Amino acid sequence: MKNLRLKSARAALDISQQQLAEMVGVSRQTISAIEKGDYNPTINLCISICKVLGKTLDELFWDENK
């Protein structure tokens, strides 16, 4: 499932995939794969992304449809 909330939060702060990747210590391809739903990030990576974007885990990664 695509993570449109992550993409939206990143875009709202005008942060590119590359910039976010550098801030959390992964490749741009990893951020792209998370946004496309092709990669399930570790909890530590999720927390790092949330800190950079100023969001909670629930806001970015919780799937309320499950």
Image (cartoon, rainbow, N blue to C red):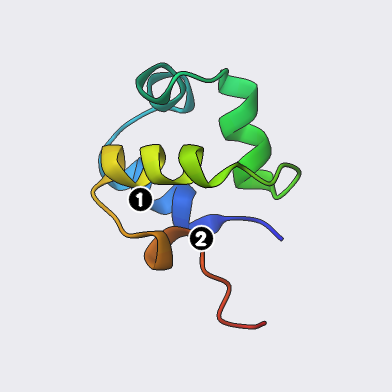
Q: Which mark is residue 9?
A: 1
Quadrant of image for the N terminus: bottom right
What residue lies at 72% left-to-right and 42% top-to-bottom? 39
Along the line of sight, the residue nearer the viewer: 24 or 42: 42
What residue lies at 38% left-to-right and 20% top-to-bottom? 19
Local secondary structure at mark 2 = helix
Along the line of sight, the residue nearer the viewer: 52 or 32: 52
Give how far across and how far down residue 12 sits, in percent: 29, 47
**Tally of numbered discs:** 2
Give how far across and how far down residue 15 sits, in percent: 33, 31
The residues bearing labels 2 and 1 have C-alpha atoms spaced at a distance of 12 Å
Q: Which mark is residue 61?
A: 2
Quadrant of image for the C terminus: bottom right
Q: Residues within 10 Å of mark 1 (few under 14, many from 20)?
A: some
Residue 55 vertical position relative to residue 30 in the rendered view, above or below = below
Local secondary structure at mark 1 = helix
Q: Amino acid at mark 1?
A: Ala
Q: Is residue 38 left or right of residue 6?
A: right
Residue 35 vertical position relative to residue 23 in the rendered view, above or below = below
